[in-house]
Amino acid sequence: MRCDLPVYLSAPAHRLGERPHPVEDAVRAERISEKDAARYGYTALATSALSPVELAERAGADTLRRAGLDARQLTGVLHAWTYHQGHEFWSPAHYVADRLGAVAAEPVGIQQMCNGSMAAVSLAARELMADAAAGPVLVTTADCFAAPGFDRWGGDYGVAYGDGATSVLVSRTPLGRSARLLAWATVAAPQLEGMHRGEAPFSSAPQSGVRTLLPKVAKKQFLTAHPSLPFGPLARDAVVGAVSRALDSAGVAGDDPRLRAAALPRLARHVMADAYEPAFASVCAAPVRVLGTDTGHLGAGDAVANLADLLGRDDVRSGDLLVLLSAGAGFTWSAAILEVS
């Protein structure tokens, strides 16, 4: 979708877990094998003693301070997550809005798994383009993957999980360090939803804390039950499709010299090198910056954390184009094209 009216992603911030867990310690504790540690390429995972929403509150406060904006000026707070937020029967989006003082905002929870931040940004952008009275909107994400409920190092294939929160303003004018959202595109493959469900029966109550969540078990069950399902080609086509459509909508050629940098999900190094990066490079020449080796995958927050890191680079200047690629269980892939303000 093309943004024909000005929409900016302003003052992105992330609050990472305050306690790094080095990969060497995880290998010694047999949380991950030496072979997988080498393939994955993470040097450490961010871990936190705080709840996810406490991290989100801090990230949101950082964004508002950098933008010079009072929380009472917000018309929306969209909060995205993938995993337990600290309570079962409540609204974490309302918690974030209340703690920040966003008394005039409508809080909304976004559940699109690890594509959540991009889903929230797209919803906020649509609202700003459709309603002259809307905005600015604050998008936050937060996830923590503490034991015993989650095995952050060894519970999944091709990814290890870090704790952290992100925040960004979706605004009509640039507020602080910003990039204009030119266009975005999303591709979904709902036929893959069972990859995170497996063969387990539906339960009548949450299982968090009762058993350790192991996504790799559901993935193995699903792939065993569907041996002819072409997951690899489906994923490749989705990446190519999302990036191509976003570029086309923005009116940007894949080899445009203004394309300064691209950031992809914070997955394991071998997954990126073998699958995501070749698919991306087939349609876009933007140099891929490797981010997140010292954080791990941040659940719903990868895209905004990547934007914050890209805008913090010395070699990214006004007028440069950035590409963000996001992916989440379900599956959903999103790509966004931005111009640095």
Image (spheres, rainbow, N blue to C red):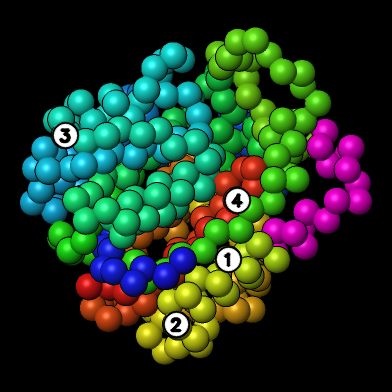
Tell me the CA gap for discs 1 and 2.
14 Å
Q: Residue at x 60, y 79 (%)?
A: 283
Q: Residue at x 21, y 36 (%)?
A: 105
Tag shown at residue 251: 2
Q: Which three-letter amino acid code belongs to the residue tagged 3?
A: Ala
Tell me the CA gap for discs 2 and 4.
23 Å
Which comes sooner in the sequence, label 1 or label 4? Answer: 1
Q: Are marks 1 and 4 in contact (CB under 8 Å)?
A: no
- Give the quarter of the figure containing the C terminus: bottom left
Q: Which residue is mark 1?
A: 242
Q: Nearer the viewer, mark 2 or mark 4?
A: 2
Q: Which three-letter amino acid code belongs to the residue tagged 1?
A: Ala
- Assign the magenta stretch its main secondary structure: helix
Tell me the CA gap for discs 1 and 3.
34 Å
Tell me the CA gap for discs 4 and 3.
31 Å
Q: Which residue is mark 3?
A: 104
Which comes sooner in the sequence, label 1 or label 2? Answer: 1
Q: Which three-letter amino acid code belongs to the residue tagged 4?
A: Thr
Q: Which residues are magenta?
A: 221-236
Q: Which residue is mark 4?
A: 332
Q: Are marks 2 and 3 in contact (CB under 8 Å)?
A: no
Which comes sooner in the sequence, label 4 or label 3? Answer: 3
Tell me the CA gap for discs 1 and 4.
10 Å
* Residue 16 image point, x, y percent: 34, 41
Q: Nearer the viewer, mark 1 or mark 3?
A: 3
Tag shown at residue 142: none
Q: Are marks 1 and 2 in contact (CB under 8 Å)?
A: no
Q: Residue at x 26, y 68 (%)?
A: 6
SS at mark 2 in the image: loop
Q: Quadrant of residue 329?
A: top right
Q: Which three-letter amino acid code belongs to the residue tagged 2?
A: Gly
